[in-house]
Amino acid sequence: MKLPSFNARAGLLRAAKLLGCISLFGLSTAICGNAFAQVAPRSATLASPPQCQPVTVPVALAEGGSKAYSVSGKLCLPASGQANTVILAVHGATYDHNYWDWPYQSIIYSYRNFMTAAGYAVFVYDRIGAGLSSHPASADATIDSDGYVAHQLVQGLRQGQLNGYAFKHVVLAGHSLGSYTSWVEAGKYHDVDAVIVTGIAHKTSAAVGTLLSQDIYPAQQDPKFKNTSWAASDPGYLTTVPGTRSTAFYYPLTTDPAVVQLDETLKQTVTQAELGGIFVTGPGTPAYYSSLINVPILLVNGDKDIIFCASDAADCSSSLALQNNERPYYPASPSMTALVMPYSGHDINLEVTAPAWYTASLAWLLGTAKIAP
């Protein structure tokens, strides 16, 4: 596949000029000018390529259920082969593990690459119903089941059940639907040390209605999935209409066209049950569990995110504004820090600006959360 040309180095420099200086609220760390432009090259030379090992984990979809399903994942260790802390990365709707470990120009777009270079272990996996993980009946793949699956992975990482590595600290990092999943896991089970949520807020914009009604359709109608056994017989599996991802998930000024093209090729599915679960309120819902999270929280959004940062959604005019907007929803957390990424859309990992928030999250882990590798 021939990808459109894009000068990544020039893109990084342009992004650095646009961003100027980003200060993470509550921290003394700042990412400024040329320092930002050097972030990705430096991270690549911190260590030799990390040790990544494929992992298949048997899981149940509900407490007391049979472990009849499997999660496909990848456990990546730093070059030293040792780490006390692992980051469990949970991808969003219509993605798989590649969102956190992008296979194109990973020096810029791979959060996994950045964090293993910094000394952390990272576990990326395909959500049940996505990628190489099991595809049950779509009605059985819900936000609740996502949270319980993540809980089993957290326990497995702590107890050494994933390729024999036991970790002292586990940090949840979620994006979009993966952030809702992180709310459920952290708020219900209280077994992680810190939570990073991206591409989320407690109020969504009207653009969500357009996305759901025009940009998402049954996967059985999509050329990529129409011949799969699970999608062909189950209209509850959904995906994005071809050609819609660029407007829904990206901000053009900081987007490499090759990333969008690859995104369309790699796209995955989400279930109708999962999407339905994020819009309900009350006890037992993701928003309810977010109020019960009792560990430090970092929230990161792109200011051009049309789903969560439009004028009728969360106030993303600045990091402080987002912090003030969202802090009341996390009463049990000892520390809730917000960061707004300028000139960035919903998929903050897949914009040229990505290394800036990667660096900020590292500073937050070391400073506010006080969780070293």
Image (spheres, rainbow, N blue to C red):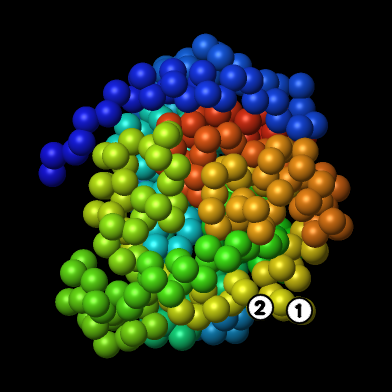
Assess whether mark 2 and mark 1 are in contact (beta carbons under 8 angstroms).
Answer: yes
Left or right: 279 with respect to 261? right
Q: In the image, what residue occupies the spot 33% across and 36% down?
A: 256
Q: Position of residue 329 (x, y in %)?
A: 80, 59
Q: Position of residue 210 (x, y in %)?
A: 47, 68
Q: In the image, what residue occupies the spot 55% across and 57% down?
A: 307
Question: How far is the residue under mark 1 from the one under mark 2?
Answer: 7 Å
The crowding category of the residue bearing disc 2, from other C-alpha atoms within 10 Å (few below 14, some 14 to 19, many at least 20), is few
Q: Which residue lies furthest to the front in this view?
A: 311
Q: Which amino acid does label 2 sit on?
A: Val
Q: Where is residue 142 in the image (x, y as percent from the top left)?
A: 53, 77
Q: In which quarter of the image is the N terminus?
A: top left
Determine if residue 97 is in view: no
Q: Quadrant of the C terminus?
A: top right
Left or right: 322 with respect to 57? right
Determine if residue 258 is in view: yes
Q: Residue 87 sits in which quadrant?
A: top right
Q: Look at the picture and state if 100 lies above or below 5.
A: below
Q: Which mark is residue 282?
A: 1
Question: In what element is the residue under mark 1?
Answer: loop
Left or right: 172 with respect to 224? right
Q: Residue 280 carries which label?
A: 2
Q: Look at the picture and state if 218 lies above or below 346.
A: below
